[in-house]
Image: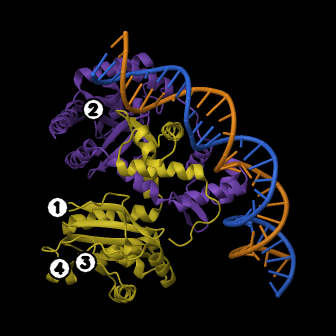
Chain colours: A yellow, B purple, C orange, D blue
DNA sequence: TTTAGGATTCACAAATCGTGAACACTTTTG
DNA sequence: CAAAAGTGTTCACGATTTGTGAATCCTAAA
């Protein structure tokens, strides 16, 4: 990844964040297991773990350490940090209820998308999209809606940093093809994902705009056998555009 | 607070966590403002902030630093970390829908309660209870339900560590009175809060149990003018106990 | 009771961090 | 248009903090 590391980085802090990442990945680990993973001395790891535990960033459950509630606390704040998020979240619930499908709100930060909210309608499929989860912007309809409204230079930066990995055989992996598609998205106002991130899953997405800047992207997704024909080409897109237009008005006048 | 600090603590890490706390409290700060707050040199703070920013724990928005999406990512994991949480969360939605009031699920960790999920029914009052928020266990119905099913020694530990601060004039602040009430809660199976955490707000709470250990507590809360009489004394408690009993069965057999 | 696995403490050596001053970059203001 | 005022950023050095393995202390099994 090309240079974004600016300034000196604090080793101790980086080590701590690495330990946190390892625990997140593996769910629950003893000090010994963490030691094997990071390669520091056990006593060293012990110091890190105890400091994090004291501040509630880690918690011990039957002998193993897990991520603690401090993350939920901080994360909850992030989620409602902006009035814009608070305005958008209930709309996502509405969309899910009205369409019966899954509705999601993602935002871009550091070049990747993060789920701020997800809601499921009556018919919605289960999907792995918990709040806070990260996704590639180029492979989702909401993500592409966001990219379409970011300055070209920023999009290039993001591609340089994260690439255009193929998640399915339908993922757009070509730079020029992506730029063409982003133009199309700007023209008609919405984006689609035809099994581009998960096989069998289609989605329509639209940007959430306020004063010409893109706050995030909203998407409606469901199984390809249900999201097809008129529903895929006009019904859902039109419904979605109605919601995002209304959202834009509320965001600009609140 | 009496000694729970075990072992050596890593200063660098503690400093970083302090900076994070300060930013959380004040929402968005420049490096200069953080410097004023913590008293380190500007260059020192700069190092911390940049390291955190690189790992997405902080993000810069119009010149100020805010908590970043890494917290939402980690926090989202914490929330669905246990199968028990995943089983309970949808039940909370049901409760809110059925009763029209606010329903909440909290768990105990390090002696304080943390909201894992909150849902609002049609008539529910707005309240400051975002996911991840911390509360005192002794002042809420769900919290007292949890305390009632923790070993006495643990309850004493928690009181020693966090005290029994009065949040309203109805809060139980006396140690013995609290122990009496916990006994009563065990006897009848549920707890109530009569404006003990917020004026005008009543709640009924019950523990979520599985194999004789308490996972957390569930509560239904609403304005005192609506939560009263039969509804307060039997209707809501019985409904809640029905749900938590069912939940217990599912938790033990899943 | 013994044993084994892990957690915890300790003192020392080595690496890391904290620092202010200097520099760079923006935006405001005269 | 220049100066000023506010940032953010870099640097080298000295002081503090951290990393370490060995020793000790816990539990929980054998």
Could you tell me how far apart the alpha carbons at marks 3 and 1 are, in whole angstroms? Answer: 29 Å
Could you tell me how far apart the alpha carbons at marks 2 and 4 are, in whole angstroms? Answer: 45 Å
**Of labels 2 and 3, the one closer to you:** 3
Q: Is residue D10 left or right of residue B107?
A: right
Q: Nearer the viewer, residue A71 or B54?
A: B54
Q: Are marks 1 and 4 in contact (CB under 8 Å)?
A: no
Residue A71's disc is: none
Q: Secondary structure at mark 2?
A: strand
Q: Quadrant of residue A194?
A: bottom left
Mark 4 crowdedness (10 Å alpha carbons): few <14, some 14-19, many ≥20:
few
Q: For mark 3, name the chain.
A: A
Q: Which residue is mark 2?
A: B207
Are the residues under marks 3 and 1 on the same chain?
A: yes
For image coordinates 47% across by 40% down, the residue present is A56
Q: Quadrant of residue A191?
A: bottom left
Q: For mark 2, name the chain.
A: B
Could you tell me how far apart the alpha carbons at marks 1 and 4 are, in whole angstroms? Answer: 17 Å
Q: Which residue is mark 4?
A: A231
Q: Residue B29: where, in percent of width, then height?
A: 61, 58
Q: Which residue is mark 1?
A: A122
Residue A169's disc is: 3
Q: Residue D15: where, in percent of width, then height?
A: 78, 42
For image coordinates 34% across by 39% down, the residue present is B106
Q: Secondary structure at mark 1?
A: loop
* Of the image marks 4 and 3, the number of the one nearer the N terminus: 3
Q: For mark 4, name the chain.
A: A
């Amino acid at each position: 990844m090309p240079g974004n590391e600016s300034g000196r980085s604090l080793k101790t802090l980086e080590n701590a964040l690495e330990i946190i990442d390892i625990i997140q990945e593996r769910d629950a680990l003893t000090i010994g297991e963490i030691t094997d993973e990071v390669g520091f001395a056990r006593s060293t790891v012990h110091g890190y773990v105890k400091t994090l535990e004291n501040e509630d960033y880690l918690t011990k459950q039957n002998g193993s350490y897990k991520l603690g509630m401090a993350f939920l606390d901080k994360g909850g704040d992030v989620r409602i940090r902006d009035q814009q998020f608070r305005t958008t979240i209930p709309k996502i619930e509405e969309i899910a209820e009205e369409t019966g499908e899954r509705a999601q709100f993602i935002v871009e930060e550091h070049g990747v998308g993060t789920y701020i909210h997800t809601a499921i309608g009556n018919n919605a499929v289960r999907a792995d999209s918990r709040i806070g989860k990260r996704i590639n912007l180029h492979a989702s309809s909401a993500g592409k809606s966001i990219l379409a409204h970011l300055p070209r230079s920023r999009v290039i930066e993001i591609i340089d940093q994260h690439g255009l990995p193929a998640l399915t055989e339908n993922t757009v992996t070509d730079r020029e093809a992506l730029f063409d598609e982003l133009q199309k998205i700007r023209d008609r106002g919405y984006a689609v994902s035809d099994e581009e991130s998960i096989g069998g899953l289609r989605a329509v997405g639209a940007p959430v705009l306020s004063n010409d800047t893109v706050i995030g992207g909203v998407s409606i997704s469901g199984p390809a056998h249900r999201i097809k024909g008129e529903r895929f080409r006009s019904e859902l897109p039109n419904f979605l555009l109605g919601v995002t237009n209304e959202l834009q008005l509320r965001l600009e006048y609140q």
